[in-house]
Image (cartoon, rainbow, N blue to C red):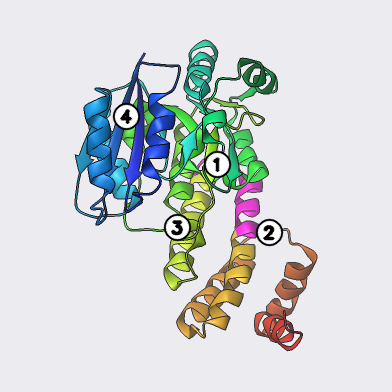
Amino acid sequence: MKVSVIVPVYNIEEYVSYCIESLVGQNYQNLEIILVDDGSKDLSFKICDEWSKRDSRIKVIRKPNGGLSSARNVGLDFATGEYVLFIDGDDYLANGAISAMMSIIETKEVDFVQFGYEEVSGYVGLSDALKINPEKIRDSLKTMFIVQDKNEMFKMLYLLGGVAASACTKFMRLEIVKKLRFKEGILHEDEQFTSRLLYQANSVCYVNEFLPYKYVMREGSIIHAAFNAKKVYDLSVMYEERIEMLNKINYKDLVNTTASRYFGMLILLYGQANKMNDKEACAFMKRKARYLLNNFDMQFSTTNGIIARLYRLGIPSIDIYYGLRKFLGK
């Protein structure tokens, strides 16, 4: 069975070879490695093109800059494998990862495998990370379990947090993913994609101790980008779409859990918007917070609970809370 590995590439000339090296060195050989250059202005495309001449499994596609979602979608247009894996071009994959996931998805007959990632500071010791360690893989796979109940799948999304929200920590059947695609022009596209994936999936294998994906923490990556109002608006769309999905399948408990997390996100981002003096974003978040308080039975942490109770009484508790934090130098 062929595996399509889709790698968006944009202005990462210093890092992309490490990613490609980790893929061509996989002990599972039946791969197509699709490198999508998203209009890079540095030498990234040239580096990718040179790699394609060294390995016939590598396809290089060059397109005008359109963002991460656009690059992934173009990669899906060219994918011909039975299974698909996304990896960002400045990260890398431990050897033995694809063969292990192939074994799981074919023997357990699930729609996708959910695995973990390890945060690393760079590429020091990369050659050691790429070595096959069958014993370590076997040990990590002992804890895997299968979930076929959609309610439990969404609960796992919240239990696992960011690792479950990422599109890069999933080994999926391509036929499912091609139906979904990534929404272009938004931030937090992974979380929206994951909501839709869970809504479509009938079975998932969770391998929580398996950490084959090496997420390289570096300045300049998307996750380190400064606050902007678009982040608030896109997250709101994502949460509201997820609430709509959960309502359709009558998971009221998860609807309220999602609304609670949405409220907490608004409180957190309000502080950032307040520091930037973004009055429009602050007003937007207040409206959304009021809507949530009026329509859902939410569960709160102590701080958010106090903010919510005061807010229901008409007291501008969000402003008071962040005003106190500013006064205390926090």
Task: Give left or right: position of 22 versus 314.
Answer: left
Q: Which residue is mark 4?
A: 33
Task: Give left or right: position of 79 versus 302.
Answer: left
Mark 1 belongs to which amino acid? Val
Mark 3 or mark 1: whose residue is earlier in sequence:
1
Q: Which residue is mark 1?
A: 124
User: Viewer-proximal residue, 313 or 197?
Assistant: 197
- Magenta range is 248-261
Q: Residue furthest top?
A: 107
Q: Which residue is mark 3?
A: 222
Q: Label for residue 297?
A: 2
Percent across and percent down for residue 88 are 41, 43
Secondary structure at badge 2 equals loop
Mark 3 belongs to which amino acid? Ile
Residue 65 visible, this angle: yes
Percent across and percent down for residue 284 are 49, 76
**What is the quadrant of residue 320 in the picture?**
bottom right
